[in-house]
Structures are given as structure tokens and as C-alpha cells.
Amino acid sequence: MLDRKFFLYVFIGMFLYSCTFGNEKRYENLEKRYVVLNERVKHLGNEVTKNRKAILNVKREVVSIHLEIEKIKKKLKKERENFNFSGIPPASLLKEKSVVKRSTGEVKLVRSDTVTVKKEDGGTNADWMNMYHRGVSLFFSGKYREAEKVFVDFIRHNKGKEFYAHALFWLGDVYMHLGKLDKAVDMLKECLRVQPDKPVARGGKSDAAMYLLGLIYVKKWKDIKSARFYMTRMKDRFPDSVYLRKLNELIGERG
């Protein structure tokens, strides 16, 4: 009887020990797992913090770039306003009626830019006149690229003729509006070479070309010396020109 009780107590003790040992083992494993997971949570937290800082830095950079773009936009807008030709007395069509005699003896009134477009035989080249006026019309409509094509073609086929200098002037003005300043200067200087002493008041473009050259040198190239050259030249040749006053005011503002 005693042996049976003894074995029973031993069995119960061993069972309880095994249960206790298993729970301790499980506890150790869970504790290790907890430590690992806790370290992982901390690591992920650090990564989130780093990413959050990186995101904030990117946002700050985006805002900075946006502000810089806005500054550049304002600067460009101001430059365009300063380089706006809307206030310039236009060397445009004077809309005067001119009497044009055809080879047949017929007399007809037409509107012209104070120039009579003639063929070598003394007749009127209506096609070229229409082309010239179309180029001017495109210019005043703001269609500068189309006007450029018209005047380039016009100049190519009418070199040396009476209205050749006028077309050179308009092409120079077109190039100026397109930002092709080197080409603009070349055309305006060629206009002055072909027609050095005929101001707008007498149906030419000389004083207007000098003004636009001065405008480019002052506002775009900051070259006051070259602008003064054209102002002095205009003062000597066209002292009553409205363009002389405008250029004088412009140079005065820039010192």
C-alpha cells in the first residue's frame, strides 16, 4: 500500500515539475521574442522619424523652389514691362493717300507708307505692296513669326528698291519682339545704311531705327555708350524727332 502511494506521489511530483519546466521554457522564449520585437519596433520608429524628417526636408525644398520660381516670374514680367514697346510712338503706316500713276496713264488713290512702290518700267507692283502691308498688319496683330517670314521673303526679292529700308526696319522690329536681338540690330543698322537721313516725319524710318537701336543697347545690353552714339546722331540729323525725346528720356533714366 505504501509503495503505491509512494509511486503516486513521485508521479505527481514529476508531472508538476515537467509542467513548471515547460512554462519556464515557454516564458524564456516569449521573453526573447518580446525583446526582439521591441527592438524591431524601436528600429521602425527610428526609420519613421528619419523618413518624416526626409519628407519635411523635401517639402521645404519644394517650397523654396516654388518661391524662387515666383521671384523669377516677377523679374521676367518686370523685364517684359520695361521692354514693352507699346508706349513708343510707332513708325507705322501714316495712312496718307498717295497718287500713283500707272503706265497706262490711269490715276488711282491708294494708301501707302508714304512710299510709291514701282516696277522698273514705272508701273506699280501691287503684289509686293500688298505683301508689304500684310507683313505690317501681321506685326501689329502680334503674329511676329508670320511677319518675319513675310518680310524675309519681301526683302529677298526687293533689294535696293525704294521701300527696301522700310521692310528692313519692320524686320528688325519683328526680331526685337522675338528676342532675336543680334538679328534685330543687324536689320536696323542695315536700314540706316540704306536710308540714313529720312525720318518718320518724311516717310522714312531712320530716326525710329536709331531709337530702337538705343532701346536695345540700354535696356537689354546695358550699353549706355552705344545708345548715346545714336542719340547724338539723331540730335544732329533729326533735332525735332519725337524719337529723340524718347531716347533722351530713356538714357536719362539709366544715367
Image (tube, rainbow, N blue to C red):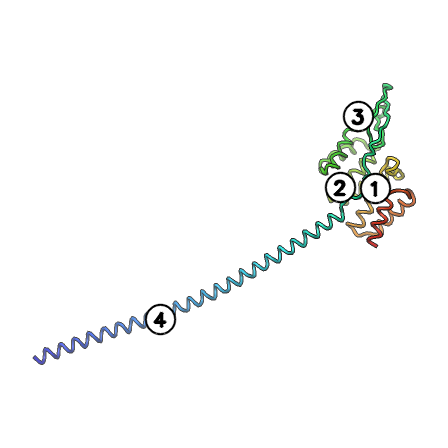
Circle 3 residue: 126
**Which residue is painted at 18% across and 77% down in the image?**
13
Circle 2 residue: 175
Q: Which of disc 2 and disc 4 is earlier in sequence?
A: 4
Q: Which of disc 3 and disc 1 is earlier in sequence?
A: 3
Determine the residue located farthest toward the top in the rendered image: 104
Q: Which of disc 2 and disc 3 is earlier in sequence?
A: 3
Check disc 4 and report its element: helix, strand or loop: helix
Q: Which of disc 1 and disc 2 is earlier in sequence?
A: 2
Check disc 1 and report its element: helix, strand or loop: helix
The amino acid on which the numbered mark 4 sits, given as a three-letter code, is: Lys
Is residue 119 toward the left or the right of residue 39 in the image? right
Q: CA distance from mark 1 to mark 4?
A: 89 Å
Circle 4 residue: 32
Numbered badge on residue 209: 1
Q: CA distance from mark 3 to mark 4?
A: 101 Å
In the rendering, at what x and y percent does residue 93 appear? 81, 34
Q: CA distance from mark 2 to mark 1?
A: 13 Å
In the rendering, at what x and y percent does residue 53 appear? 53, 63
Check disc 2 and report its element: helix, strand or loop: helix
